[in-house]
Image (tube, rainbow, N blue to C red):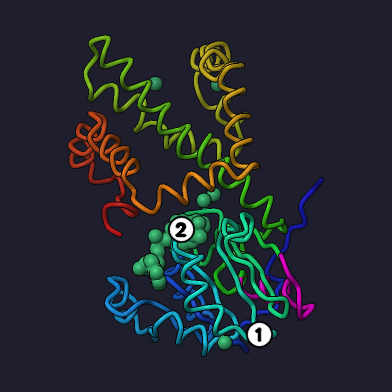
Amino acid sequence: MTAEVFYDDDADLSIIADRKVAVLGYGSQGHAHALSLRDSGVDVRVGLQEGSKSRPKAEEEGLTVATPAEAAAWADVIMVLVPDTVQAELYKKDIEPNLNPGDVLMFGHGFNIRYGLITPPAGVDVAMVAPKGPGHVVRRQFVDGKGVPCLIAVEQDATGTAQRVALSYARAIGGTRAGVLKTTFTEETETDLFGEQAVLCGGVAELIRAGFDTLVEAGYSPEAAYFECLHELKLIVDMVNEGGLSNMWYSVSDTAEYGGVTRGPRIVNDGTRAEMRRILDEIQSGAFAKEWVAESKTYDNFDKLRAEQREHKIEEVGSKLRDMMPWVKRTITETA
Ligand code: NAD
Ligand code: MG
Ligand code: MG
Ligand code: MG
Ligand code: MG
Ligand code: MG
């Protein structure tokens, strides 16, 4: 099953430029979408609660800010970019009462639709434009004349034009410069959760920590362990990103390649693969969604886990070492 891919020529920018677009939320994704839509000539309003810390940031950029309810009432395209766990409540209170037949309700991730936390009325289009990168990269690439690839999906097509609107929106934030893949809410949600849990965020963080701990516990310096297990990862990932795993194996020494192909499968082994399958099962069954929605009411366990991540030795030594390496760009967490 090969996905359909769309580029600039497949998307008509004038469609979204003729609509009124509310971007609800001005965080990682929200700021990137709102600013790039505006720069693409789209009439956009940002929806934020009174007193929200994001308000002054959006206003400083010259964007028009309203409450989420006002922005939703004004708009005919509503992009929901508040955290996944607050979307259902925001939807009930501020969006649903302001939806008209023919409006397009859009998401940057399929979580709330996939798990039935939001059920839009029949006359409304439901679509997704999900950039496959952090919001700050989405914005930076757009400004640089490039783009981050996006996924689009249509869950409900009341007007028969939902896909064309979504493609036009994706073009306005730079997505079609890089390529936009067609998917479904179910596929996007399940693969996105799996990727971030098993590989990109959870898997990588734990691999880094375990490698670092192993070296430090064996008596090597934390500085050397930091360089080997964290710092160099970027160089490796860049090679993988540019030319696949083969490109990386080609570039590293034969010693690294032989050691890697013989030892790697001992780290990610049959047990790891079986655990990946269990993680996927929890995503597909809705068990993870249920757990996360319940945890988001208090953050009790999550706060402890966050503190434990922050207080790990690798963060302390890393912070000192990065201060000595001004060429290491601090664009996302430290300057955002
Ligand atoms: P974020 O946490 O960075 O920002 C959330 C924004 O929503 C903030 O401006 C906050 O003030 C606002 N907000 C919070 N509660 C609100 C409420 N009750 N009413 C109105 N505004 C409220 O969020 P994010 O990481 O950009 O995620 C937004 C969506 O984009 C999610 O669906 C997420 O899964 C998806 N997504 C995020 C990324 C990413 O790079 N972070 C990538 C792809 C998709
Ligand atoms: Mg409206
Ligand atoms: Mg993802
Ligand atoms: Mg995600
Ligand atoms: Mg080395
Ligand atoms: Mg080689």
Say which amino acid is labelled 2: Thr
For label 2, the crowd category at 10 Å Cα-Cα, with few meaning under 14, some 14 to 19 and many 20 or more, is: some
Q: In this view, does 164 lie to the left or right of 70?
A: right
Magenta segment includes 161: yes
Q: Is residue 137 visible?
A: no
Magenta segment includes 47: no
The residue under label 2 is: 85
Using the rendered view, name the quadrant where residue 318 is placed.
Answer: top left
Give the residue displayed 60% in from the left and 41% down from the top: 283
Asked if 302 appears above or below 32 in the picture, the reply is: above
The residue under label 1 is: 14
**Residue 160: image x %, image y %?**
79, 78
Say which amino acid is labelled 1: Ser
SS at mark 2 in the image: helix
In the image, 178 versus 200, the foreground residue is 200
Asked if 286 appears above or below 240 in the picture, the reply is: below
Give the residue displayed 49% in from the left and 65% down from the top: 87
Quadrant of the rendering where the N terminus is positioned:
top right
Give the magenta part as a residue range.
155-169
**Residue 31: image x %, image y %?**
41, 70
